[in-house]
Each structure stands twice: as C-alpha cells, then as structure tokens.
C-alpha cells in the first residue's frame, strides 16, 4: 500500500534519544527502487534499500566523515557511503559478506579480467562439450545440452534444450541413451554440512544435507573444475583477478544448482 507523505508516521522506540527521534521524524517518505549493479553482482540476504541508506548518509553526515556499519552485510552502507565521499568502516561476521563487499568496491583491471575469462573458456569448453554432450536429433552428430529439466520426483532428466554446432539446429529433445555422460572422476572438495536454519526443512525433505548435494554430479564436476582452473591461472592473472573470478563463479552457483527452477513462458 502506498502511503501519502502526510500520512506517514515513523515508528520510533520510546527509549530512543530525543535528538534521534527528531531526526528520524523529519525523514518523511523515501521512495525505494530496484538494486543497482554493485548489488546485483552477487546475491546477499536482507540487503537494505539503497535509496534509504543514501538519504540517511547524506542527511546525517558530511563528505569526509567516517561511518561505521558493524553489521554491514551486503554492503549498502559501504557502497552508498563511498559514492557520497564518506569514509566507511564496514564489518561483518560472515566471510561471504566480507568478500562480497570487497568486490563491490575494489577497482578491477577489466582488461585482465576479460583475458582471464577467455583463457578459462579455452580450457573449460572442451570439458563441457564432453559432459554436456547429447545426440543431435537432426543430424545425429554431437550437440550440446544448454539446459536440462529434471523431474522433481524421480530426479531423472525429462527434457533437454540442445544446440548443434554441426548442423546448426537447436530445440528441445527427450533424453536418450548415451546423452549427458556422467563424469568419470570428481575433483577433490571438502564436504560441508548445511547448517540448520529457517529454510532447511525443505532441503532435508529432499534428502539434501550437504552443500554438494545441491548439484547434479555433472554440475558439481563443472563447478569444481572451474574453481580449480581459476586457482591454477598463472601470470599475468593476479590474485585480485582470480578472487573476482571466484566471486563471479559464486554468483552463478544458484543457476547450476538443483534449486534452479524453470517455468514454460
Ligand atoms: C540484516 S544483515 C545486514 C544487511 C545490511 N544492512 C545491508 O543492507 O546489506 C545483518 C548482518 O549482520 C551480520 N552479523 C550478525 N551478527 C554479527 C556480529 N556479532 N558481528 C558482526 N556481524 C554480525 C550478519 O552476518 C549479517 O550479514
Ligand atoms: Zn546436428
């Protein structure tokens, strides 16, 4: 429901200092809008609306001031504070939050980053074309699965969207024997149990107790291979570029997982 500004009554704790009550009372209505690119690069839970933070920062501080956010999460105070030329100390207990914040604000050598992506593609494409291989229903040659839909009850593949580099055909096909060969090995990884939280009961019902169980064997293999290949990159790719690539990979994990759903348009 949209509130007209004159209807707006901020909820302020009775125990708040008078000065703060007065300041908050004067804020009025702040329109929110969708997240901007620094925030859409990587998901974070409970990110606050950036316009509200921008307003709080510009109203209550001046350029050069130091702002401390001890629960900085997805970095809204950090990004908006820096844009408004404040100095910001952003702290968070969660190492993922710290990594996200670092890459939201740290300059990146884009030329080097794009070069690293190209190098990775050269190494990974031959691997992907093997483990996502399907028979082209048009010419019988080796095509590639772009996505695969699994039945949520049987966990079996039911539809594959393929593209064929030989005859150029693409479309949806039914899986057939020989399609999507399973990887024969698995890169080493540390198995980590998913901590019990508000959202874990759905996962437990589906028999998912460890993070790796969120992926099909094939997608887990690809994600781990990508991680390995990023870590293996040598000169001229420095630690900053590698860290940003891992951050990019982390941001895409939701699309690789079994939790990624598909709806017919
Ligand atoms: C609601 S989120 C903050 C969201 C942030 N305002 C934003 O807009 O992205 C709360 C954050 O507090 C962090 N946190 C919880 N307890 C903490 C503690 N004791 N020390 C530091 N950070 C903590 C959590 O990891 C989480 O990232
Ligand atoms: Zn074909």
Image (cartoon, helix red, strand yellow):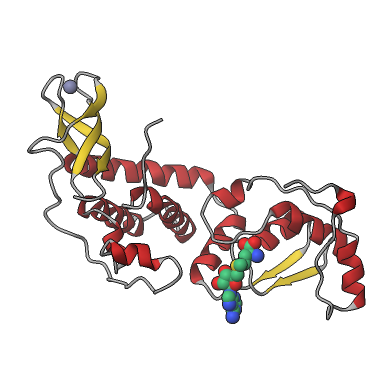
User: Does residue 55 appear in this view?
Assistant: yes
* Residue drawn at 45 percent across, 61 percent down: 239
**Quarter of the image containing the C terminus?**
top left
Q: Quadrant of residue 27?
A: bottom right
Q: Quadrant of residue 171?
A: top left
On the image, the x and y values in percent for residue 37 come to 60, 46
On the image, the x and y values in percent for residue 122 come to 29, 41
For residue 194, side relative to residue 71 (left or right): left
User: Which residue reaches farthest left?
Assistant: 177
- In this orientation, which residue lies closer to the viewer: 20 or 37? 20
On the image, the x and y values in percent for residue 174 come to 17, 32
Q: Is residue 128 above or below residue 15?
A: above
For residue 262, side relative to residue 101 (left or right): left
* Residue drawn at 28 percent across, 55 percent down: 215
On the image, the x and y values in percent for residue 114 come to 45, 42
User: Does residue 236 appear in this view?
Assistant: no
């Amino acid at each position: 429901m949209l509130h007209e500004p004159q209807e707006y009554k901020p909820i302020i704790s009775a125990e708040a200092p008078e000065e703060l009550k007065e300041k908050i009372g004067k804020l009025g209505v702040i329109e929110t809008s969708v997240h901007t690119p620094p925030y859409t690069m990587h998901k974070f839970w409970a990110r606050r609306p950036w316009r509200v933070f921008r307003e709080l920062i510009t109203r209550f501080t001046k350029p050069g001031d130091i702002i401390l956010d001890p629960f900085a999460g997805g970095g809204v105070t950090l990004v908006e504070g820096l844009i408004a030329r404040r100095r910001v100390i952003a702290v968070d207990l969660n190492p993922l939050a710290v990594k996200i914040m670092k890459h939201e604000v740290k300059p990146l050598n884009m030329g080097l980053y794009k070069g690293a992506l190209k190098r990775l593609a050269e190494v990974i494409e031959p691997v992907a074309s093997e483990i996502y291989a399907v028979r082209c229903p048009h010419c019988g040659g080796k095509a590639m699965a772009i996505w695969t839909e699994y039945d949520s009850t049987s966990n079996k593949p039911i539809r594959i969207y393929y593209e064929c580099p030989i005859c150029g055909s693409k479309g949806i096909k039914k899986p057939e024997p020989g399609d999507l060969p399973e990887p024969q090995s698995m890169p080493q990884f540390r198995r980590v149990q998913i901590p019990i939280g508000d959202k874990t009961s759905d996962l437990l019902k589906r028999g998912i107790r460890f993070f790796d169980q969120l992926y099909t064997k094939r997608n887990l293999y690809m994600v781990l291979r990508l991680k390995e290949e990023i870590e293996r990159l040598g000169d001229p790719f420095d630690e900053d570029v590698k860290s940003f690539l891992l951050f990019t990979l982390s941001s895409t994990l939701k699309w690789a997982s079994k939790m990624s759903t598909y709806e017919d348009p």
